[in-house]
Amino acid sequence: GNEEDTEYFHDKFRGKYKSKALAIIPKVTGTISFLCSLLLASYILSSSKRRSSVFGRIMVGLSISDMFSSAMWFLSTWPMPTNSWLHWGTAGTTQTCSAQGFFLQLGLCTATCYQATLLLYYFLTIVKQSRESQIKKWEIFFHVVPCSAGLGTSIAGLVLKLYNPSSRGSVCWISEYPAYCSKSLSCDRGQNAIMYQWWFLYVFVCLTFIWLIVAMSTIFHKVRGVEKKARRFSHESGNSKDVAMQALFFTISYAIPWIWAPIKAGIDTADIIFTNPNADDAVIALSIVNVIVFPLQGFFNFLVYLRPRYAQVHEWLANTRVVVAVRNCLKMKKSSSEKQSGNVTSYEGNQTDVEMK
């Protein structure tokens, strides 16, 4: 019957476009990123010294932002309406899809702005040689701007009904619905979605990349000058180079996930998909790479933060309540086993004495 034919077509379509993989993979990568961001924020907040620094509070803001987006990646296709036949594992409604899109946009936009703020902190510290007390005077803007940008664009997307199942993705975000409806000019929701994707997120990403390039170039130029002066006068150059390298690693950790998403977004349009047969395969490959790499932003930030502080973080983890509790349970279990083993040995020895008598 027609229903069987339709279901057969849907299954073939989902198989071709790797819908099952696109639904499952981000649950794994999103969970890893969420846990890493949670660990990073907990580590900073657990010390009055770390949480009192401007850098520490920026990292907490960045980590919390990533936790929002990572949680939405973990949910993947679950919040999508059940009639979204393009996707596998749907179990939600239009409202749950809109909620997922709201928090994903909030996390992505806020984290992008916090990344720019983080490089601004390094720029002020190395290039302008500003003291911590001077930077603290302006710190409120380091948090107000990212939070305002994220919250403002998220609310606007909700009002404009922009959050819908992405055409070939794993989450609800700014998308036209039904998929590729702009070709027929009859979208139910998400009209002009591509334009809003750029205005609500990709413009922030592009500006952040430009700022990262300018800031890193200026930072390394400054460090090179400091090192030349130090060699000339046979002085130590301090830790400017180490700080600059840490800033570079944070920049790379931000750039790696963002390489794929804009390329996929640029190709996955109705005009290109329906006119270029090779574009379809490219979008499938980019979609798989994107759901592997993109949700791992928190994981990359954690690795970079951990790099110069491995011993400190390792000691903190070893002394956290959960780890201590697990360690104590294992010790108690081992002690109980040894005691029980000793009792059995003692009992067997007594039995042997009885038999000998």
Image (cartoon, rainbow, N blue to C red):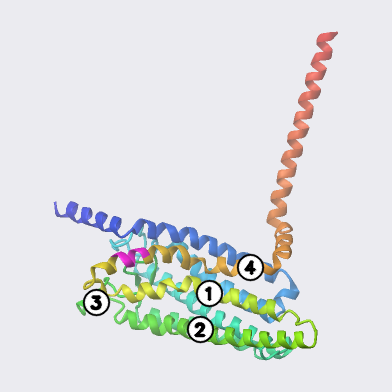
Query: In this rendering, would 334 be left or right of 109?
Result: right
Q: Relative to 256, is 288 above or below?
A: above
Residue 248 position, x and y percent, is 60, 77
The residue under label 1 is 254
Q: The residue under label 4 is which amino acid type?
A: Leu
- Is 97 or 337 nearer to us in this picture? 337
Circle nearer the N terminus (4, 3) = 4
- Graded by Cα atoms within 10 Å as few (under 14), some (14 to 19) or many (20 or more), the crowding at tag 3 reads few
Q: Secondary structure at mark 3?
A: helix
Q: Earlier in the sequence, mark 4 or mark 1?
A: 4
Going 74% across and 60% down the picture, which residue do you hit? Answer: 315
Q: Earlier in the sequence, mark 2 or mark 3?
A: 2
The amino acid pointed to by label 3 is Asp
Which residue is label 3 attached to? 271
- The kind of residue on which mark 1 rests is Tyr
Q: Are marks 4 and 1 in contact (CB under 8 Å)?
A: no
- 95 or 176, nearer to the observer: 176
The secondary structure type at the circle numbered 2 is: helix
Task: Give the Cα distance between marks 2 and 3.
Answer: 28 Å
